[in-house]
Image (cartoon, rainbow, N blue to C red):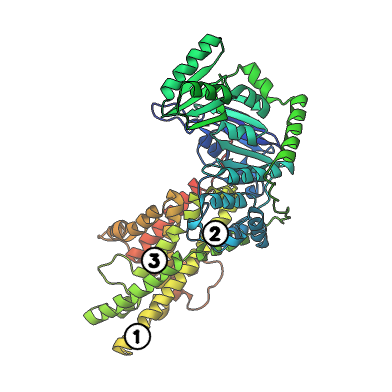
Amino acid sequence: MIQAIGLTSNARRDQPPAADDVSFEAPPGRVTALLGAADSGTATVLRLMLELQAGRGVTYFRGRPLHRIARPSREVGVLVGDVPGHPGRTVRGHLRMLCAATGVPLSRADDVLESVGLVSLRDQRLGTLSRGMDRRLGLACAVLADPHTLVLDKPSDGLCARESAWLHGALRAHADQGGTVLFSTADPREAARGADRVVTLDQGKVVADQEADAFARTRLRPRVAVRSPYAARLGALLAKEARVTQRSVEIVREDGNRLSVYGSHCADVGETAFRHGVLIHQLADEVGDCGPPPPPEPSERAAAATPKPEAAAQGARRREARGRGSQAPLSPLPPPITVRPARTPLNPLRYEVRRATGVSTGWLVTLLVLTVSTLMAVALARAGHTPQPRLLAAWPHELPLPPAAMGAGLLGALAFGDEFRHPALAVYRAAVPRRLGLLLAKLAVSAATGLLIALATVVCAGGALHLVYGSELSRVPADWPLLTVSWLALVVGCAWAGLLAAGVFRSTAAGLAALLAVPVVLVPLVQKAFEGPSARSAAGLPGRLRDLALSQWPFGSERYIAGALRVIAQPVGGALLLSLTVLLCAYLLTTLRTRLR
């Protein structure tokens, strides 16, 4: 059961809201259509229901709002937008990534691929799929976690008649198993054929809530579609004959050379055209749309929202007759599954690993970083006047950050791209504890990636220097422990800065901008803060910290404390620490807060 109550979008400048006090119900075991034109607000209503857009009102899925459901992917399956994933990812790889995200067995991906007919295309890239295959994959993503409710935004848009019939057959099979189905459409005939109940929106408001039989009787009526190069003349002849014979015939001139004749038959129109020698290119019976109905009275709307037993029985008989007479066989849905709830971030960690390794972006960035770092180290050694630690890090004085740190920051900024672009993953982030586990998983994977890039950069640069110039420039420095810690902390900090900035601003470009702001903007500010005669010395701080500790520290530990403080005291280290602190606080305030209704 879906209960949408008072859904209202935020007001737009000099325009009414896209959704204005929209309330309706979608009962279980039935298919409900949300009908409206492109500017009627159907997409806004669905996004408000799924909490993908800010606004007022609340939607209950079996008595609970989406942000109160611990495992929302098991309750609501979503299809909003086009290709639901990275275009470079394979079909099977994308489904297995979603399996790891939702905590279902990986074998579930093969089950849904077989049910939607994509087994032969499982190794194909998402960006190469046709429109029909894309819709099949979208339905596979929606039913992957065996949800009770399906919410689909124009699922048959751009499909041929055969693909559309298959899709609605699959939705009917889900409803027959007791599930709830809600889909939006702009075609009244599709709503009448594929739904049991039709909710009509016009200019962001509910103007009708009807059973499909009543909708087809009041909204749709038969007509004769005519195409002729002499459409104007034929229309005048038909109107004249209707006046002579005193018949109620309505003739509507469509775009181009098309006529829509209401209240007549193909035989009468064809005979009139034949008698007067009018050339006909098309003559067919159709079902036409007579426009949105007027808004019902409040009492009528309340009565329509309560299904009567006779109407329910009539709808059941109609669905049974439709199932017996349908030419397209219903698609078998994947079998139900049993998933044990898990409170650990293990599922988010598996998801993040599959997300990062499922496309070639990470490997290409790493390869580019290692290549640039190796060439830059060799060029710096040839020019001279560069300390050995900077040679091994391939960090010239002219660059604000080394290539390894820039590459790690870029991969961190790309880590949040899938979740913000594809609503199939956005629903997975609805519950606050699951979002926290996802953040920890992303921080862990980005840190591991940064460590690998940092170590690989030093190895490749040192090997190239040893090969070109001998062992003099590739020897290990005396203070290598502190330099190693500083180098790893710099790269991991840059990766986290890009990750948190992209998470706060929901933009990869914002993540890179925040990363570059550390050496360009924050470092000069930190340097000015520590300059001048008013600055005090922190000498002896490790010893005082040891005296204040409740227990004795191991002998020599102040050396490591002094080293850590020395790293933080560096302008880049202090600025990076400040940036991470601010971004983490902003992320906690903007993303992890609980939305109270």
Q: Viewer-proximal residue, 373 or 163? A: 163
Q: Position of residue 207 (x, y in %)?
A: 57, 23
| Marks 3 and 2 in Cβ contact (< 8 Å) | no
Dot 2 falls on a residue whose secondary structure is helix
Q: Which mark is residue 440?
A: 2
Mark 3 or mark 2, which is nearer to you?
3
Residue found 67% across the figure and 23% down from its top:
304
- In the rendered view, would you say 19 is above or below 520? above
Q: Position of residue 257 (x, y in %)?
A: 42, 29
For the C terminus, the image quarter is top right
Image side of residue 238 versus residue 323, left or right: left
Dot 1 falls on a residue whose secondary structure is loop
Task: Give the quarter of the image for residue 472.
Answer: bottom left
Residue found 48% across the figure and 66% down from its top:
447
| Marks 1 and 2 in Cβ contact (< 8 Å) | no
Instruction: Kindly identify which residue carries mark 1.
Output: 474
For the N terminus, the image quarter is top right
Amino acid type, label 2 = Leu
Image side of residue 390 versus residue 119, left or right: left
Q: CA distance from mark 3 to mark 2?
A: 20 Å
Task: Give the quarter of the image for residue 266.
Answer: top right
Image side of residue 178 versus residue 387, left or right: right
Q: Earlier in the sequence, mark 3 or mark 1?
A: 3
Q: CA distance from mark 3 to mark 1?
A: 23 Å
Amino acid type, label 1 = Ser
Q: Earlier in the sequence, mark 1 or mark 2?
A: 2
Q: For residue 51, say whether it is visible.
A: yes
Amino acid type, label 3 = Gly
Mark 3 or mark 1, which is nearer to you?
3
Q: Viewer-proximal residue, 166 or 467? A: 166
Q: Which mark is residue 407?
A: 3
- In the rendered view, would you say 509 is above or below 258? below
